Amino acid sequence: MPSEFDLIRRHFDRAATHCDLAVGDDAALMRPSPGMQLAVSTDMLVAGTHFFADADPALLGWKTLAVNVSDIAAMGALPRWALLAIALPAADEAWIAAFAGGLFDCARAYAVDLVGGDTTRGPLNMTVTIIGEVPAGQAITRDGGRAGDDLWVSGQPGQAALGLAALQGEASLNDEGRRRCLDALHRPQPRVALGLALRGVASAMLDVSDGLLGDLGHILERSHVGAIVDIAALPLAPLLATGAAATTARRCLLSGGDDYELLFSAPPARREVIQEMARRLALPLHRIGSLTGDTGVLLLRESDGTLHPGAAAGYDHFG
Ligand code: ADP
Ligand code: MG
């Protein structure tokens, strides 16, 4: 039976590239760059709540770090360091090696150093704490949205939820669609480059983890504004015309979680800059509506032009 220390040394201790002291001592030592603020966030993934206990460990490793990187991206910050607290029901080394492999794939892809953590026996769950840097005062928060701003979203929100619906037999997709949706569900690509590019451009921003309308509700609340969302402008709107599957598609597009795309507002004067950004980053950015002065009111504009209240229901663990 490997000891806790064997497990840490074998699986979680890798050379760090931008930290003075990483795994192995009582605490890690990092040097924030001059003039930077630290952006710090933590996210927990619990078996049975956020993933199936028999999920592919490599994909789980990727996602555990990726969802945290996404929170840093959503501030317009650069992710730098992470800590991993993990509870494992048993010392299953093949599982741990695969999990660590996926986690370090993500760490390499986003240049994040794993600098420490904690390893204990217990019901399977992983908590990452991530630290990023942003020039002081330039972080993009949820509270800067103004009436009249455009509302934008990156990528194809709804794909991850469609992938989950496909796994559960609730959505039928063609092979290519299924592959893309499962990829979105299992290997989210946090939009770090976009977040950085939007500094000084976006007025408010967050990442879509709990569903488009639910997360938009957080911007409305913090910015004291309302919003109109154009259903026809949603990137996956064509799926809403597909007969029997339309109800599932609508739920996935409007309230499906796990996308980790960026939802942001920006003044209309910034449209060209944002479209140019989309070309440069080769990442589709969709203008899906606008912010209004009607504090807290979220309206949906259907493709026939009718307006009706949209419930801002996202995923709520206690709801
Ligand atoms: P302590 O007894 O001081 O809490 P630990 O024995 O828990 O220290 O951890 C030893 C070292 O290994 C520390 O540097 C800690 O940050 C690191 N560590 C423990 N678990 C992990 C993990 N899952 N991933 C990365 N580093 C870890
Ligand atoms: Mg410890």
Image (cartoon, helix red, strand yellow):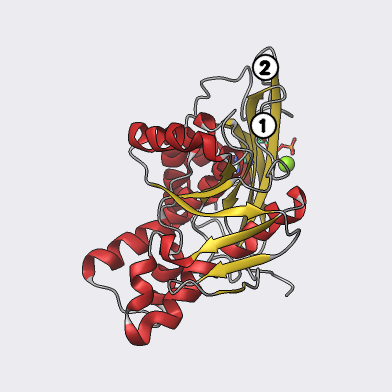
The image quarter containing residue 118 is top right
Residue 95, numbered circle? none
The residue lying toward the viewer, choosing from 22 and 170, is: 170
- Please state if 195 lies on the left or on the right of 37 as rendered: left
Q: Amino acid at mark 2?
A: Arg
User: Which of these two is toward me, 249 or 95?
Assistant: 249
The answer to whether residue 211 of the structure is visible from this angle is: no
Instruction: Name the residue: 51% across, 52% down.
Output: 260
Which is nearer the N-term, disc 2 or disc 1? 2
Q: Quadrant of residue 241?
A: bottom left
Q: Which residue is mark 1?
A: 139
Residue found at the far top of this picture: 34
Q: In the figure, 34 relative to 115: above or below? A: above
Q: Position of residue 63 (x, y in %)?
A: 49, 52
247 or 270: nearer the eye? Answer: 270
Q: Quadrant of the C terminus?
A: bottom right
Residue type marked 1: Ala
Where disc 1 sits, the SS reads loop
Circle nearer the viewer, 2 or 1: 1
Q: Position of residue 314 (x, y in %)?
A: 63, 68
Say what secondary structure mark 2 lies in: loop
User: Which residue is painted at 68% across and 12% down in the image?
Assistant: 34
Q: CA distance from mark 2 to mark 1?
A: 19 Å
Pointer 2: what residue? 31
Regarding ligand 2, which quadrant of the image does it lie in?
top right
Q: Position of residue 266 (x, y in %)?
A: 57, 40
